[in-house]
């Protein structure tokens, strides 16, 4: 027995085991995500189709509003593809942000009765949204086939941008999840941010229509960089990436992620006491 | 041998808010209070920082020290609010201590609630995997124990039925089965066995005994002294956040009962502010006396009298007493209506109730009180406020002095006739 590792519990000293524990509980990420997906589709009639119908209809509306009515330029690619290349990361972010934000509250019972690294819960929520993201990706492939649109070499860089989108969703999700435990006001802020964000992000239009002198300011919205990156990788051809703006967005995404993890770690010890 | 669990100077503080029902904070209040403080500072720059009257410190645990050796089966005893659950939560790493240090050797599994993380929509099979993962088992481990878990829970036929269709007994069986197959070096169990039927409780106790015999360490919280005595070898008694006893389980149980004024059958609170109560009701005194003679026994009859202070006027006030055995079985409730027209006076009331002779068997009993409004709402509820022992007597029973079986011991109206030869 003496060669066993000794666990020391002391005020403010949980850090030492944390990352090791996170690794030990790695299967829990999978199980919680699996539970959420399973439950969601057990209760719905058309199940998985929801992950396809919602983005598809949103795309149709955006094409009608921004292309047919507002007559915005399409950068030489079919407008539905232009919209969908942006809708994919945006919906991923919006879903992940919402789900992660509410994840701790809806798992309050587990938090107050069992120990595991709390980081597992919001992360699993983001993973669930990521699965939806992958499923919606089928529509993009379908659109490309329909319009006979072939991406060029840049498509291989897509995983990098997916990673950035994931980081943005994680960072924002962790912030909102931790804040929501302490201040329940944040449950009202979540839908507002999602709705507001859709208008200030270049989802229905190309960010190329933003006047040159405003683009850096526009990139203060980290999703601008993520969406532009997706378009750059998927649409190829003459789509240009506005590098200063992209780097600014990238920096902000990483900043949100790192501070999100730090804030979450700092507050998570008290979750069981306040939830 | 070094201890598997060493607890040094452990304390845990909670801040309790008096105004709010919810524990979380509303951002609105934070902003409003912040603004108030700033304006206060500006208008009264030299005023001392005042304490927030809405918040009060509460030490759920204070300076707890104990060691637990490998293979010990330790019962943790105490009244509600003594800090048992907080101690288990800290040992299970659900919440952090405020100060102090704990060293634990070996894998800990804690079962503070049955079926944590169970999802009603998922099937029994799916929930076994989910719950196992939440409790810290790997997928491979769950797979290897799967058949054992199912057999223990006796749910073979319903494996692929959503657990929302399970009976509550099945639900509890399944949940306990998963946790019981964790095979930790240290098992922490809160009062979860109170649920489920008697047969299954027995099975759970058996399983925990096996765990203990295998040299693993068990920490067990229960209000059921009989269960504690059967299962545990050692005992720790907590009272108001402090440890008042550690040692052999029998002594611990005696200490727990004794600590609650077993011999002193009268409690009187000098300062009403320290007395049990809340904003509606304050208890002033409670006394248990024999109706006849000087010893409470089967024949004596028992008089229970209380004095309390009612704070708010214009209520329909009623008073109910609950009598419990030491094992937590409620024997009866009985009470009196003090006012039914919403016109109770502010001030002191006294109540008196008499338990007739030959009702209670010899044993130890506990009392809960409930002060209600209009026989509908609880104004104040106090558990285990006092306990008392009923002694054996020989009178009216012939000369047999051993304790008769049964919870009550009535003298029935017997008669007999000799019919024929």
Image: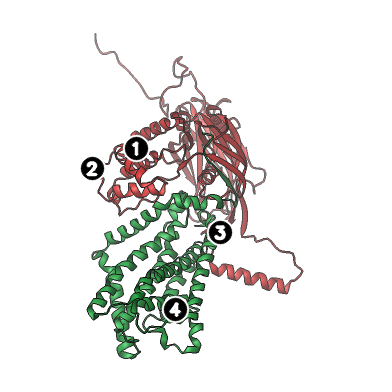
Residue located 38% across and 72% down the image: A157
- Which residue carries the number 4 mark? A224
- Which residue carries the number 2 mark? B157
| Mark 1 vs 4: CB contact within 8 A | no
Q: Secondary structure at mark 4?
A: helix
Judge depth for marks 3 and 2 and give the one in front: 3
**Where residue B120 sits: x, y (%)?**
32, 53
- CA separation, marks 4 and 2? 54 Å
| Mark 4 vs 2: CB contact within 8 A | no
**Where residue B67 sits: x, y (%)?**
58, 35
Q: Earlier in the sequence, mark 3 or mark 4?
A: 4
Residue located 39% across and 38% down the image: B180
- Which residue carries the number 1 mark? B197
- CA separation, marks 1 and 4? 60 Å
- CA separation, marks 2 and 1? 20 Å
Asked whether the residues under marks 3 and 1 belong to the same chain, the reply is no
Q: Is residue A183 left or right of residue A157?
A: right
Residue located 74% across and 64% down the image: B48
Residue B359 appears in view: no
Question: Which chain did the renderer colour red?
Answer: B
User: Callout 3 environment at 10 Å: few (<14), some (14 to 19), or many (20+)?
Assistant: few
Q: Residue furthest right?
A: B46
Asked whether the residues under marks 4 and 2 belong to the same chain, the reply is no
User: Callout 1 environment at 10 Å: few (<14), some (14 to 19), or many (20+)?
Assistant: few
Where residue B407 sits, quadrant-wise, is top left
Where residue A101 sits, quadrant-wise, is bottom left
Q: Secondary structure at mark 2?
A: helix
Q: Earlier in the sequence, mark 2 or mark 1?
A: 2
Find residue A266 and name its label. Answer: 3
Q: Is residue B72 above or below residue B118?
A: above
Pointer 3 chain: A
């Amino acid at each position: 027995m003496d060669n066993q590792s000794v666990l020391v519990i002391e005020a403010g000293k949980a850090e030492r085991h944390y990352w090791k524990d996170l690794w030990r509980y790695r299967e829990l990420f999978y199980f919680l995500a699996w539970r959420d997906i399973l439950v969601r589709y057990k209760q719905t009639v058309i199940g998985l189709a929801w992950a396809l119908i919602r983005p598809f209809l949103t795309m149709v509306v955006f094409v009608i509003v921004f292309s047919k009515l507002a007559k915005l330029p399409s950068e030489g690619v079919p407008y539905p593809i232009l919209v969908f290349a942006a809708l994919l990361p945006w919906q991923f972010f919006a879903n992940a942000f919402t789900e992660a934000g509410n994840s701790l509250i809806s798992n309050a019972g587990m938090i107050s009765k069992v120990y595991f690294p709390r980081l597992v819960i919001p992360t699993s929520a983001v993973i669930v949204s990521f699965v939806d993201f992958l499923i919606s990706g089928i529509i993009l492939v379908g659109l490309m086939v329909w319009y006979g649109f072939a991406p060029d070499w840049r498509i291989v860089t897509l995983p990098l941008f997916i990673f950035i989108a994931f980081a943005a969703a994680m960072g924002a999700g962790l912030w909102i999840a931790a804040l929501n435990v302490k201040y329940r006001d944040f449950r009202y802020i979540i839908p507002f941010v999602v709705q507001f964000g859709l208008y200030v992000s270049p989802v229905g239009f190309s960010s190329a229509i933003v006047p040159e002198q405003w683009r850096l300011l526009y990139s203060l919205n980290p999703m601008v960089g993520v969406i532009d990156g997706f378009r750059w990788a998927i649409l190829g051809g003459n789509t240009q990436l506005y590098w200063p703006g992209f780097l600014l967005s990238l920096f902000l995404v990483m900043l949100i992620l790192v501070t999100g993890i730090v804030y979450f770690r700092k507050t998570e010890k008290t979750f069981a006491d306040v939830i | 041998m070094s201890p598997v669990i060493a607890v040094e100077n452990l304390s845990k503080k909670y801040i309790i808010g008096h105004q709010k029902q919810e524990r979380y904070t509303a951002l609105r209040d934070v902003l409003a209070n912040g603004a108030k403080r700033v304006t206060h500072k500006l208008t009264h720059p030299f005023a001392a920082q005042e304490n927030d009257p809405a918040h009060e410190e509460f030490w759920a645990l204070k300076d707890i020290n104990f060691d637990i050796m490998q293979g010990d089966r330790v019962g943790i005893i105490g009244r509600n609010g003594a800090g048992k659950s907080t101690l288990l939560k800290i040992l299970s790493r659900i919440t952090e201590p405020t100060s102090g240090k704990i060293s634990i050797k070996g894998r800990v599994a804690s079962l503070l609630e049955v079926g944590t993380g169970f999802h009603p929509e998922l099937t029994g099979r799916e929930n076994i995997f989910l719950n196992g993962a939440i409790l810290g088992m790997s997928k491979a481990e769950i797979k290897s124990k799967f058949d054992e878990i199912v057999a223990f829970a006796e749910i073979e036929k319903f494996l692929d039925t959503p657990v929302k269709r399970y009976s509550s007994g099945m639900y509890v069986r399944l949940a306990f089965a998963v946790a019981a197959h964790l095979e930790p070096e240290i098992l922490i169990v809160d009062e979860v066995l109170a649920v489920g039927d008697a047969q299954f409780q027995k099975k759970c106790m058996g399983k925990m005994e096996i765990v203990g015999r295998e040299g693993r360490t068990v920490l067990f919280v229960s209000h059921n002294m009989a269960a504690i005595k059967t299962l545990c070898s050692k005992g720790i008694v907590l009272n108001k956040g402090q440890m008042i006893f550690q040692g052999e389980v029998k002594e611990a149980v005696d200490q727990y009962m004794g600590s609650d004024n077993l011999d002193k059958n009268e409690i009187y609170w000098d300062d009403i502010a320290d007395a049990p109560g809340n904003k509606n009701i304050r208890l002033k005194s409670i006394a248990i006396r024999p109706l006849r003679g000087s010893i409470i026994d089967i024949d004596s009859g028992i008089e229970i009298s209380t004095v309390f202070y009612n704070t708010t006027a214009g209520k329909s006030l009623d008073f109910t007493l609950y009598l419990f055995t030491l094992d937590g079985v409620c024997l009866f409730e009985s009470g009196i209506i003090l006012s039914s027209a919403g016109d109770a006076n502010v001030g002191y009331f006294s109540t008196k109730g008499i338990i007739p002779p030959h009702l209670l068997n010899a044993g130890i009993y506990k009392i809960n009180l409930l002060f209600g409004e209009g026989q509908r709402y609880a104004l104040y509820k106090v558990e285990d406020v006092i306990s008392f022992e009923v002694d054996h007597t020989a009178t009216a029973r012939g000369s047999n002095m051993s304790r008769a079986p049964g919870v009550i011991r009535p003298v029935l109206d017997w008669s007999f006739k000799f019919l024929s030869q």
